[in-house]
Structure formats: C-alpha cells, structure tokens
Image (cartoon, grey):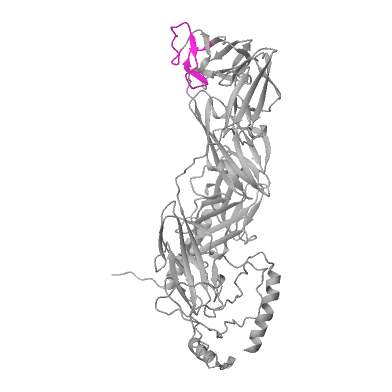
Amino acid sequence: MKQTYSRSAIRTAHRVLFVLVTSALALSPAHLNLSTFVFAAVAPTITIDSITDVTGEHFPSFNFSCDADPLFGDVSVAGSGTGSAPPGQIEQYGVEVDWGDAVLNNSTDDPGIVVFAATPPSGQSDFTFTYDAGPHTYASAGSYVIHTRMYHVNPSGNDATADVSITVDTCVVVIPPGSGIVNVTKIVDGGTKSADDFSAILTSNGDAGDAFALSGDAIPVEVEEGTYSIDEVADAEYTTEYSDGCSGDIAENDVIDCTITNTVVPVTLGSLTISKVVVNDDTGSAAPDDFSFVISPAIDEDGDTIVDDGILTIPTGESSVTFQNIPDGQYSIVEVAQDGYSFSSGSGTNCSFDGETATATVASGSPATDASCEFTNDDDPVIVLNGFLIVNKIVVNDDGGEGSVNDFPLFVDGSPVVSGDTSTLPAGTYTVTESGNAGYTGTFSGDCDENGQVTVSVDQTSTCTLTNDDNDVVVDPDPDPTTGSLTVTKVVINDDNGEGSVSSFPLFVGETQVTSGESNEFDPGSYVVSETNASGYTASFSGDCDENGNVTLEAGDALTCTITNDDIPSSNDDDDDDDADNDEEIGDDDTNNNNDDDDDRRGGGGGSCGTCGHRPDNGDSSDDSTPDDTQTPPAGEVLGETDEQPADPGVPDPGPEPEVLGATDALPTTGIPAWFVLLLVLPILWATKRDA
C-alpha cells in the first residue's frame, strides 16, 4: 500500500533538515571544502573552454609558454559550469575573471566585459551556465595566470556560499600598435651545428635591422606593418630554405609563422680550373687551345696522376679545362712559352701568381675550396720595315676611245690607290690591279711583271705603270638583220575637182600610224596596210602590198606599198560637157553635191565621191587661191587635172585638156622665176573667170 504524506508534514521535514545542515556548518567550518561542498543535488563546477588571441582560438589542454606557444595581443576567455540554488536564486550568481595582471572583471560590475548566462536563468534549482570574458589588453609581455571563479550575490561571496575556480598559465606577447608579429623558427638538418648557431636579419619596408639569434623554438619578432623579409646570415656549410611566411606583407596585429630550414652540405673534394685568354691585337692568330701548361703534382680530371709529365693542353675549341675531385693541397701551374706571345697577366680564385707561375690551393669541405687560375697572353708587336710603291696610269685613245685616268680605279692587294701617289707599305710582294677596262687592253711595265706583281723592298721605291690602249673597233660589214623596213607612200589624184591632200588620208601598218614616204622598221611577220579614206575617192594598192593591203615582211626586207586615191567624178560632169557645147551657163546652184560621211579606214577598197565640185569646160578649177609656198605638204604625190593619168581602156580618149595648176601642183622649173610666171598666168585666169 502506497504511503502518502500531507503537505504540512513535508514542510516540517524540510525545516528540520535545514536546521540540521545549518547546525553542521556552524559546528565544523574547518572541515568544509568550498570547491566540492554540495548544497543540493548538483555540485558547482567551472571550466575554461577556450582562450582566444589574435592568432585564433586555443582549446585545452593548454600549454602556453614564452618559448613554445605564447599568446599574442588581446586575450579573451570563454567557459562553462554548473550550480545549484538554494542557497539564493539562480539570478544571484555570476563569474569573475582575474587576468593575472591585477585586473579583475566580473559579470555583476562589468557586464560588458564578462557575460554570464544561466539555464534556467532564474529560480531555485540546479542550473548550468556559460560565460565570455574579454578581450583584455596587457600592458607588457610576460607570463600571466588567468583565474576564473563562480560567485553568489557578489564577487566576494555571500551566505557562506562556496564557489569554484580554475587557473591557466599563459605567456602573452604584446603587439605594439601599427605592428604585427613574425614567429621565426629554426630547423637544422644534419651537421654539427644547432639552431642557435645561426642568425637572421629583419628587413622592414626597405630598412635592414641588426642580426638576431635564431632558436629551435619560435621567436616572436615585432614587424612594422608593410613589406618585410627575414633573411638568414649565410653559412657555406648549409643550404637554406624559407617558408612562405618569411617574406611578404604584414598588417597590424597579424601573427605570421616563418620557418628557416638548413640542410648540411655534404663534404666534397675540391676542383681546379685553368683558363686561357689570348689577346690578338697585333698580327697574332693563336687560339686558347694552342697553349699548354705543366702541372705539379700532375693530376687528371679524375684526380689521378698524369703519366705524361703533367703536360696539359687546353681541349680543342675550348678556352679552359677543369679537374674535379682532386686531393687537397697546393698545385703549381707553369705555362709553356708560345712563340710570338708574352705572358700578360694572371688572376683567379684561391690562386696566386708569381710571374708566369701560378699556385692554386684546393681543399675538401662543405663546401669544398675550389681554385681557378686564368692566364692571359698578348701577341707580340711586329716591327714593320716599310718600302714605297707608286702606281701610274696611262690611257691611250688612238682608236676612238674616250676613257680617262679616272675611269680605271687602281688597287694594290685590293686596297685602292691613286695614280701617281706614293704608298707606304711593309716590305713584301704585292699585286697591282685595276677595274673598268672594258674596250681597252692593259699592260704592265716598270717594276711590275706582266701579271702586276711587284716586290717592295725596305726603304726602296718601286714604280708600276699600267697602260690602257683602246681596242680597234671591228665593225661587222654585214650583220644579220633582225627587222625589216616598210615604206607606205600616199598618191592623191584630183582630176575630178577633188581637193584632198596626202594629209587627208592617215596611214597605218597594223595599228601603228605611219607617215607617207617614211621608212619604218618592223619585226618579221604579216601586216595589213590601211588608211582612213576621205569621202569622194577610190583607193588602190600597188607595190609589195596585195589588193587588200596585205604584206609579208622578212628580216632584212625593204618593202614599199603605195595607196593611190583618185577623186570620183560627180554626176554633173556629163551635163557640164553638154552645157559647154550649147554655150549654156550653169550657176552655182546647179551644182550637185553628194555627201558621203563614211570616213572608215579601208584597205584595198574604193570610196564614193564626197562633195564633188563642178568643173567648167574651160578647165578652170575655180580656185582663185594662190599656192602657199611656205607650207610643206606630207610626203607623197597629188595629181591635178593636167597630170597624166593612167589610161583606162574602157573610156575613149577625149583629147588634150588645157593645163590647170591646182593648189598642190608645183610650178615648172624652167629657169624663169616663179613670180614672173604668176604675173603672166593670173590675168589670163581672171579674164577666163570673167567671160564665164
């Protein structure tokens, strides 16, 4: 059967328990352990869960030290714990932080620095809590103990309430304003040296500081914000490797890690390099591989003894030779003398010179001591004994040549000289030459042989004369022709009142326009001779052209073609004869005019009459103009009415016609002056004109 109790009974039991506990506290205070005393079911606890600096958040287990893992800059603390109320209320509890530098902050007085949060937040019951404190700024670097505790009512405690606390040892590095921290760590791999045998130099924003000792533990180095580098003082026995953080940019409150690792260089044997420099500034032509040396003690490239008396020759095409891994010691190197050259200077590393003898020191080590010796030789100046040479030029123009001395440049061994000038030359044999002698034959005389060679002796003057005589011009009496000539002649017949002239009929050979009576050269081939025919004329070909104007020209030919243009009688000519028999007069209005505008070029065809004029029976050409003796007509022939025409078998002979001088007809040359003839003829012509 379940036992039940009234509320009053339960309340009475609680009061009895409270009195007993209070009595126990009063009777035995020395035996109390405040860190573990339990007022209720849950014992109070407190922890530090993390500590944060500028490098980030750190978690238990904490192992801060100035040598290994310090804190940098401002520090914050976060933690948690448990508690029980009564005594008092949950909201009466808080947390206090002692930063170890005589500064204390608590959640009651400094809620902005220490934040306490309980769950549940109030009442009387067991509870949990968290807290956050900081950030806290330390005035100086050093070792500090951070202490946190939970309290009831006030930081000093109340109602004999027990609290709990925890401490953490730290080392804090204070970062000055405007700076960051570079943690430099040294690692040494091999050899006999330790980390503190090395040192490094900080260069910040271009300014190098003093060297500082390195350590296997991280050394915080304050670096002004900007650009920086950490550079180790070199040690020849070790190689050096830097991590990324050993150089770059840094900002305020940055904390950067830099690791410098040194690896020992294995011990090696030394080497010896012998090099040769040759100066050829006079007449020398030797190369470095033409020189040799004597080495003592004798060695080869593997450090072995050279059997052939230690004679070393520079390899072909090279200027130096190197011997690797040779035993420690001093080596003597002497250059073998070379004709025409003198030792100029010597230089090198771990190599000293005494005149032409070099002493090289080689030692094994890490690194090894290598030696290099450089020998410089200069070619000896040559004492030149000079002579003199004069070259004269003579030009003979007895066969039509027009050359002058300046047309024949002169040379001595390829170097130009001036005719008649004295050249100073080292004693020896030379060759005189010239250029520009086309059409001339050159001969040597004087001290030159027939080939232009001459010997110049010391302090003696030699003279060479080069004569150029123009060659006879041989003309080929009968050179093979490559072209032929063709002459086209124009004949114009004006026996039916035509007024055309030679210039009225432009002439062509193919597409080339030619002038009547002039010879023209053409390549061998077939051509068509043509003209631009004037209206009122018929045209016919004669000579070497066929009836169509075709002609074939061979090389060396001299062909001629004649185009004759005869004016065409007009239809009025028969009427004129009848009118003359009947003594009838025909006026100008009775003249028939037939216009033909066809100006096409024709070859071999006839043309129609164009604007044929009326011809009276009395033969008067009605041309009152006087020929202009000041104009020269084109080459060719113009036949007027009184000129003898070729007989036409189909037309009866009308008998003799009176002679009429046309504008293009020439006056007969009888010895009588032309002006006298004109004085006789002009009145007759005027009277005839008037009677008509």
**Magenta span main SS:** loop
Q: Is residue 357 visible in this depiction of the protein?
A: yes
Q: Position of residue 533 (x, y in %)?
A: 49, 74
Q: Is residue 390 inside the magenta stretch?
A: no
State whether residue 438 is above or below residue 422. below
Judging depth in this view, the residue of 240 and 546 nearest the camera is 546
Q: Position of residue 529 (x, y in %)?
A: 45, 66
Horizontal arrangement in the rendering, residue 184 relative to residue 393 (left or right) = left
Judging depth in this view, the residue of 271 and 175 nearest the camera is 271
Q: Quadrant of the N terminus?
A: bottom left
State whether residue 304 is above or below residue 86. above
State whether residue 449 is above or below residue 223. above
Residue placed at 52% from the left, 9% from the top?
295
State whether residue 298 is above or below residue 251. above
Q: Position of residue 683 (x, y in %)?
A: 69, 80
- Residue at the far left in the pictured view: 1
- Write down the region rendered in magenta: 300-329
Judging depth in this view, the residue of 303 and 242 nearest the camera is 303
Q: Quadrant of the C terminus?
A: bottom right
Q: Position of residue 34 (x, y in %)?
A: 53, 51
- Residue at the far top in the pictured view: 309
Res 216 → quadrant? top right
How many numbered marks appear? Answer: 0
Judging depth in this view, the residue of 12 and 304 nearest the camera is 304
Q: Is residue 302 inside the magenta stretch?
A: yes
Q: Is residue 273 visible in this depiction of the protein?
A: no
